[in-house]
Amino acid sequence: MECELPRVNSNRNEMKKYFEECKTIAIVGCSPNDTKASNHVAEYLRDAGYTMIPIYPKGETILGQKVYRSLAEIDQEVDMVVVFRKPAALNAIADVVIDRGDVKVYWTQLELINNEAADKIKAAGISVVQNYCAMVEHREIFA
């Protein structure tokens, strides 16, 4: 896949609203390795008061939270999905986000852009943030 710039994205005011309205955040690609960015972001969001749900292919817990293998496996409402997966995986993740029917915000981390996936998400009425770090934005908005 060649490099893309986000065609679909949210601004800082919209991000603030998402953080204020969302309570439960699923982290797709949440690593148990505490040196990885996904682990730091998950810990930050959990410590900021959000219910954090890690999604990872192995292990039982990450940061004291039950690990799920996929978004589809989660048996509670999910307000926001923060993604730490390669752009090629984002279309499949977008399909699951849409199928869930409860996700309000689809957020891909820095350098993760897939406009085709973002277009699908937006067409389904779900807000999109691409190529921003959820931790950095939350800190800057609520500092």
Image: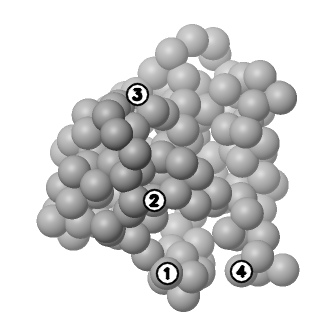
Residue highlighted by disc 4: 141
Reply above or below: 61 against 82.
above
Give the crowd class for mark 4: few <14, some 14-19, many >=20 residues within 10 Å: few
Q: Does the CB distance between marks 1 and 4 fall below 8 Å?
A: no
Give the number of the mark in front: 4 or 3.
4
Calculate the distance from the C-alpha at mark 1 to the C-alpha at mark 3: 28 Å
Give the number of the mark in front: 4 or 2.
2
Give the crowd class for mark 2: few <14, some 14-19, many >=20 residues within 10 Å: many
Residue highlighted by disc 2: 130
- Rendered residue at 54%/23% (across/down): 56
Name, please, the residue furthest toward the front: 2
Give the number of the mark in front: 2 or 3.
2
Calculate the distance from the C-alpha at mark 1 to the C-alpha at mark 2: 10 Å
Asked which quadrant contains residue 66, the reply is: top right
Determine which of the numbered discs, if any, sits on residue 70 in the image.
3
- Rendered residue at 23%/66% (across/down): 122
Calculate the distance from the C-alpha at mark 4 to the C-alpha at mark 2: 17 Å
Q: Amino acid at mark 3?
A: Ser
